[in-house]
């Protein structure tokens, strides 16, 4: 039985070889370009002969290829980023050479969304989540900026605006008008002020004497 299988295999191999030998050889040359723009060359495309034991050839950096094939062979053109293209050569080519221009379409692959988390375990995520400080929203930020304490601190460092200057000037003018008929106190006639001055002089002499 084993000899029968071997004999049948030899017959099929011989038939396939004879069928392959019946097709004449041709010199195939061509170039691979982008289907969207024929001016763009697709370099280093792998050309696999599906009809000849997947014999592989590679186009050069200019997309040019040249090798020997049989008439009617099926060629598969593959390249990263492009959709594979299968080309079947015609039969009964009158000349011993054939020129081919292969158009390859760009392959767009939509990958699923991938989220990267900085936590190695669920326990670390839970711990960081519980201790996380949530940022204030716009309403909370406005409330803090308009609080009494924030306005008091800002009034110490910010210059007065035109409204405040006008209000202070108006108050000063009103005070001058109200006091223009009254006598302004003279500090030289104030006995308390003279007593304070004399006391300061005496205290200064004592400190120098010591």
Image: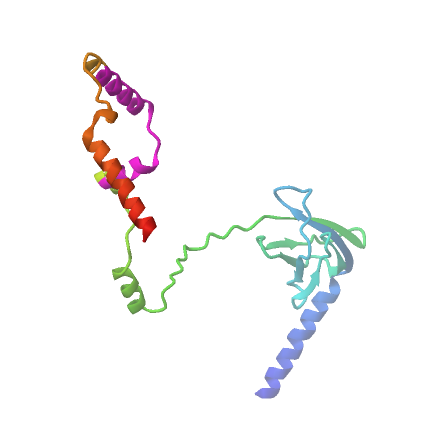
The number of numbered discs placed on residues in the rendered structure image is 0
Asked whether 104 or 4 is in front, the reply is: 104
Viewer-proximal residue among 15 and 150: 150
Percent position (x, y) of residue 12? 64, 74
Q: 4 or 128: nearer the eye?
A: 128
Q: Is residue 155 magenta?
A: yes
Query: Where's residue 137, x and y in %?
Result: 28, 43
- Is 98 left or right of 189, judged from the image as shown? right
Return the residue found at the far front.
Answer: 209
- Residue shown at the point (20%, 27%) measured from the top left: 190
Quadrant the N terminus occupies:
bottom right
Q: Residue furthest top?
A: 181
204 lies left or right of 43: left
Q: Identify the residue at image location x=31%, y=49%.
A: 207
210 left or right of 3 in image: left
The residue sitting at 46% across, 52% down in the picture is 110
Q: Which residues are magenta?
A: 149-176
Is residue 73 visible to the viewer in this orientation of the structure? Answer: yes
Name the spot of residue 131 as percent of width and height, x first: 27, 61
């Amino acid at each position: 039985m084993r000899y029968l299988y071997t004999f049948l295999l030899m017959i099929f191999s011989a038939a396939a070889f004879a069928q392959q030998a019946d097709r004449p050889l041709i010199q195939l040359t061509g170039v691979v370009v982008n289907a969207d723009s024929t001016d763009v060359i697709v370099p280093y495309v792998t050309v696999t002969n599906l009809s000849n034991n997947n014999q592989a050839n590679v186009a050069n950096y200019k997309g040019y290829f040249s090798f020997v094939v049989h008439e009617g062979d099926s060629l598969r053109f593959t390249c990263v980023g492009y959709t594979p293209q299968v080309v079947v050569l015609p039969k009964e080519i009158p000349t011993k050479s054939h020129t081919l221009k292969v158009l390859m379409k760009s392959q767009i692959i939509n990958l699923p969304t991938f989220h990267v988390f900085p936590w190695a375990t669920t326990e670390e995520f839970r711990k960081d989540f519980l201790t996380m400080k949530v940022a204030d929203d716009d309403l909370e930020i406005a409330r803090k900026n308009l609080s009494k304490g924030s306005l008091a601190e800002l009034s110490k460092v910010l210059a007065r605006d035109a409204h405040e200057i006008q209000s202070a000037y108006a108050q000063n003018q009103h005070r001058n008008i109200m006091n223009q008929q009254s006598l302004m106190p003279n500090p030289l006639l104030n006995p308390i002020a003279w007593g304070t001055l004399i006391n300061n002089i005496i205290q200064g002499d004592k400190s120098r004497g010591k």
